[in-house]
Amino acid sequence: MPIHEQLAAGPEFDVIIAGGGTAGCIVAARLVEADPNLSVLVIEQGPNNDTPTVETPVLFHANIFPETGTNIFYQANESPHLNGRAPLVSSGGVLGGGSSTNFMMYSRPQRSDLDAWNMAGWSADDLLPGPIHVSSGTFRSTRVQESFITAASTLSIPIASDLFDRETPIGVQRAQRFISPTGARQDTATRYLLPLLPTHTNLHILLRHAVQRIIFSHRRATAAQLQSGITVKAKKQIILSTGALGTPLLLQRSGIGLPSILSRAGIPLVHALPVREQYLDHNLFYVPYYSSLEEHETLDALASGRAEPREEMLGWNAQDVTCKLRPREDQLGPFASVWADFVERKDRPMGLMSLVVANPLLGVEAGAYFAVSAFTAHPYSRGHIFVGSAAGGDGKGGGKDANKEIDFDAGILKEQVDLEMCKWLYKTQREIARRMDVYRGEYEAGHPPFAEGSEAACGRRDGPTTGGEIQYSEDDEKVLEDWLRANVGTTWHSLGTCPMGKVVDERLRVIGVEGLRIADLSVCPGNVAANTGFLAMVVGEKAAALFGEDLGVDLSV
C-alpha cells in the first residue's frame, strides 16, 4: 500500500502504532512481515524521510535547526541551574524518528547498564540489534583523528580494540557510525519499513497526522483519535512509539498519569500511573579549537556554505574518534558522594567524548577547526514532563497543539555532582586537545572567559603544549562553573519517562489497562553510558518479539 496523508472516515486496523519513530518502524516491519493477514497502521505526525538532510550523512547538522522541519522541538522550563536558560530539546520528527535525524554515532550500553534494570528478558545478553550497517562510512579526516588518539594515549587513555564491548569503561578508538560502507544513513524507516511497501498490502502508513489521545472502552484501548478529528479503531493492539517526550504526553492526554496533573488539565482519569516519574538525558557541551588543518580536512567550509562537499565526504558525520573516561584516583574528591556507584560497577564510565572535525559555533571566521563534544554518562539530576493546564481542551484530552502547553523540566545540572562531572570533562578534554599536534589554541568564543594572565586563559597558540596539566585557581573554577551553567545542554538522548516496573511491565504493556503497549525509549528504567540510537533499535526488536507473541505471530519464521 502506498504512503498516505489522508484516511477515509471510520477505518479499522488490527494494530495501530502511534508514531513512526526508530522503534515503531521496527515493530511495524516485523509484525507485517511475519503475518500478511495482520493489518498494521503506522501514524507519523511528520513527513517521509526522503530529504537530503536525512539521506546524506554529511548534512546531518541541519536537522538541529527548527526551520529544517525534520525534528520536533519541546521547550523546557527556564532553570536557575542553567542561569535562567530554557533548553530546547528535539526529537525525531519524520518517519524513522531519531534514526533519521541523529548524528549516527554507534555505541552500545555497558553490560551493567542493562543488567541494573533488573527486568526479566532485558539483560544485556537478551538484547540484540537487527539488519543495520555499522561502518566507517566513506571518509575519515585521518590526520586529526590520529592526532587525537595519540594525544589521549599520552594521558594513559588506552587505545581500545572494541570500546563498545559492553565491558570497557575507559579507552579511545576510531568511531564507527550508523552509515553503510557506501555512505547511506542507517535509519529504521529505510532499512526496515519502506522496503515492505511494494509487497505487503497489510502495511499502511499515514503521514502528517498526530494522535491526540487514545480512546478506552471499559479500560481497554480501542481507538486513536487524531488531531484532525478522525478516530481510527484498533481491533487488537495500540502501540505508542512517540518517543520519551511524546509518549508520556500522549498517555496523559488519554487519561493515564498522576491524578493531580490530569485534574489540573481537565482530563478525566482512566488510570493513575507515575507517568514522567523520571526524565533522563545526558548533559552535553562542545568546545572548539584552532588547528593547523587544511579546509579540505574539516567540515567547516561546507557548514558555512563556502564549499560543496567532495563526493567521498557525503557519507561522513565529521565525528571520527570516540572515547570513554573515568577519573584517576587523584581526581575523585568532587565525586566522593557518588563514587560508590562507580566502585560497585567497575565498567561504568563517567563521561563520553567525540572528536568533531568542525567548529560547531555559528558565524565563525573562515578557517579549519576541530572541536570536542563531551557528555556525562550517568547524570544524577532528574526532570519531568507534564501536560499543561490547557491540554484537556474539550475535557477529553482533545485540545489542539497540546505539546505546546507543557510543564517540562529538562533536569540539567540540578545536582551539584553533575556540574562537577562536567567540570572534570572540560578539563580532561582540554588536556587531550592541547597535546594534539594539530592544536593551535582554544577558539575563545567557545570556551570559558578565564582571566588574562590565568594559567587557564584561552587563545591562539603556536603549537601543542610540552608542559604539565593546567592548574585552575579558585577564580578559574568559578568562571568554569558559570560557563557550564550557561552552555551545557541536552544530548537529545531523552529516555525513562514511562519506565518498566512503574508505567509498563516487562512485556511493555501499560499497567492497569488492556490493549495498550509502548515501544520507545520512554520505557527504559535507567540511563546508559552510550548514545541512544542503538538502544532504541534493540528496544524495537525486543518489543516486536513481545508483541508478536501476544498476537500469536511467530517472528522467528
Image: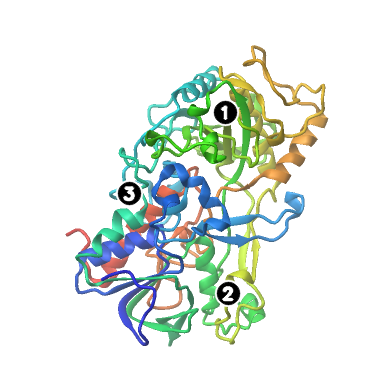
Name the mark nearer the viewer: 2 or 1.
1
Disc ID at residue 129:
3
- Percent from the top left, x then y, of residue 516? 40, 74
Task: Identify the residue at image location x=77%, y=41%.
Answer: 482
Measured in 3D between alpha carbons, the distance from the residue under mark 2 to the one under mark 1, in whole angstroms, is 43 Å
Give SS at disc 2: loop
Few, some or many residues within 10 Å of mark 3 (<14, 14–19, 20+)? some
Residue carrying label 2: 401
Q: Quadrant of the C terminus?
A: bottom left
Whichever of labels 2 and 1 marks the residue nearer the N terminus, that label is 1
Examine the rendered structure and indicate whether residue 472 appears above or below residue 488.
above
Residue carrying label 1: 368
Look at the image and tell me whether residue 293 can be seen: yes
Task: Identify the residue at image location x=31%, y=47%.
Answer: 132
Task: Identify the residue at image location x=38%, y=59%.
Answer: 23
* Horizontal side of residue 303 vs 191, given as left or right: right
Identify which residue, 511 or 192, lies in the foreground: 192
Measured in 3D between alpha carbons, the distance from the residue under mark 2 to the one under mark 3, in whole angstroms, is 35 Å
Identify which residue, 361 or 245, lies in the foreground: 361
Identify which residue, 512 or 517, lies in the foreground: 517
Query: Quick check: marks 1 and 3 in contact, CB under 8 Å?
Result: no
Measured in 3D between alpha carbons, the distance from the residue under mark 1 to the one under mark 3, in whole angstroms, is 37 Å
